[in-house]
Amino acid sequence: MFPLSQSLKFAAGGAIFTLTAAVHSPYADTMTQILGPVGPYAPIMSSVGNKRVVAFFVPGDGRCNVQAVFWNADDVDAKSAAGVRVSLNPAQTVSLDSSATETLTLKCGDSAESLSASDQQVAAK
């Protein structure tokens, strides 16, 4: 039997491998879109403008504890990657802007049981 810390490392490695395999496509300019709603720990994957986004949530205290990572679409080494963590109440949203006119909105579902996304084009001001 493996010690708990070694099992957790194996699980984390498997999750990273799965996300990497799901994000890569035979077409360099495309990425699988998953806008949800998804349950806990399941990924939301989207492109917003020239950015790629992968997000998931962990439920806790009746809230969606969201983690999102975004990077430039042309950055194959993900050196431009940045992340954000936010805790949302049920039905609350957070917007991730790619530019002045493009945004991805993440919404915590009823009873913090799901997370969904919608991408929007916003009129320039």
Image (cartoon, rainbow, N blue to C red):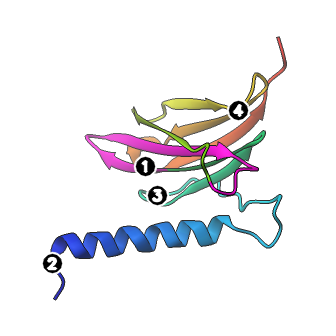
Q: Residues within 10 Å of mark 1 (few under 14, many from 20)?
A: many
Q: Which residue is mark 2?
A: 3
Specify whether 46 is left or right of 106.
right
Q: Quadrant of the C terminus?
A: top right
Kindly state the secondary structure of the residue where label 2 is placed: loop
58 drawn magenta? yes
Q: CA distance from mark 1 to mark 2?
A: 26 Å
Q: Quadrant of the N terminus?
A: bottom left
Q: What amino acid is at disc 3? A: Gly
Q: Which residue is mark 3?
A: 39
Residue 115, how many percent across, how many down? Answer: 51, 47
Q: What amino acid is at disc 4? A: Ser
Residue 38, how many percent across, how many down? Answer: 53, 57
Look at the picture and state if 104 lies above or below 44.
above
Q: What amino acid is at disc 1? A: Phe
Q: CA distance from mark 1 to mark 4?
A: 21 Å
Labels 2, 3: front one: 2
The magenta-colored residue range is: 56-77
Q: What amino acid is at disc 2? A: Pro
Q: Earlier in the sequence, mark 3 or mark 4?
A: 3
Q: Which residue is mark 4?
A: 98
Kindly state the secondary structure of the residue where label 3 is placed: loop
Labels 3, 1: front one: 1
Q: Earlier in the sequence, mark 1 or mark 4?
A: 1
8 drawn magenta? no
Kindly state the secondary structure of the residue where label 4 is placed: loop
Q: Earlier in the sequence, mark 3 or mark 1?
A: 3
Residue at left 73%, top 49%?
A: 73
Q: CA distance from mark 2 to mark 3?
A: 28 Å
Q: Nearer the viewer, residue 119 or 27?
A: 27
